[in-house]
Image (cartoon, rainbow, N blue to C red):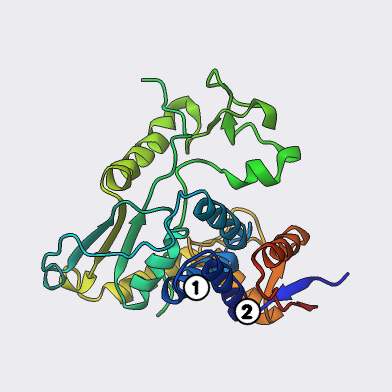
Amino acid sequence: MSCTFVTQSELERFISNCLMKVGVNVEHANISADVLAYKNAIDTEKRGLRDLTRIIEEIKKGIINPKAVPRILKELDSTKNGLCIVSATNSNSFECASYYEQLASNDDLIGFVCTNASNNVIVPRGTKSGFLLDMACSTTEDKLKSKKDEFNTYWALDVNGQPATKFEMFAFLQNLGKREGSEHKGFGLTLMVDVLSGLIGHCFIVINPGCFAPGFGAHMTEIMRYLRQMEPLVPGIPAIVPGDREKFHINEINDQGGIKLTEELVKMSNFLSTTLGVENLTSFEN
């Protein structure tokens, strides 16, 4: 059975054209397309193209201002000190944290990026071989929407704060960590992110390890090598570190010549092409 694929550059072209049709200028449309196409490439759920539909709807509803121009509100000299913190206020979703972390990593810097979403997590009672962690502080969200028939009681809670056994009972996302004995850890991470990004704005932290730990890059490479070479718990399934799955998806795209599109995403792109009047994705079968 053949599958539908699209190159990343073609996906960027399509996303950019869609955004320009709803009033985003060329420069900002191209930047956004780069982020969303990257997200589609590394993400097994292929949320980049899905998010494009949401963004366009929010622009049409006036939630997102397509004409907004970023400006610097306050700036201090932090580069020479080895630590830089940037916050973005009055902004919508930045879509993919690891995209910005990767920018820092490419320059041999440590990047920490966080943002927040609406309050849908329940509060508990009372060499280029890097580490790239991109995660939410809930166990899952997209699986709730895409795998309703495979509902897992670890994913969500009902209105009474008890594990939901089916999608119709879903009221809150489950915190990281099981309720028995460790739920404060997941909520603690969530609250930390909310303080940094909910009160301040999107938070971007970059650290130059060379100012504090000479030889950091070599040490980090050795740690990654050590972790990957550990004896796996399940024979045949090697140990991996955060970032390995994303690299696997990128390598898979290179081998296949493009990003695999599900039937849902093909229909989605057809719908956007028709409603916005843009040239549809040029795809190929493999």
Which residue is outermost to the top? Answer: 160
Per the rendering, the mark at residue 281 is none
Helix, strand or loop under label 2: helix
Q: Is residue 216 above or below residue 190?
A: below
Q: Residue at x 64, y 60 (%)?
A: 237
Residue tagged by mark 1? 34
Q: Residue at x 47, y 52 (%)?
A: 135
Residue 121 picture location, percent across and down:
47, 34
Q: Name the image quarter holding the N terminus.
A: bottom right
Residue 251 picture location, percent across and down:
61, 76
Q: Residue at x 24, y 76 (%)?
A: 215
Q: Name the image quarter holding the C terminus.
A: bottom right
Q: Is residue 248 visible?
A: no
**Amino acid type, label 1:** Asp
Q: Quadrant of residue 213?
A: bottom left
Residue 144 picture location, percent across and down:
64, 41
Residue tagged by mark 2? 10
Q: Residue at x 27, y 72 (%)?
A: 216
Q: Mark 2 or 1 closer to N-term?
A: 2
Crowding at mark 2 (Cα within 10 Å: few <14, some 14-19, many 20+): some
- In the image, taking residue 37 as reference, residue 6 lies left or right, namely right
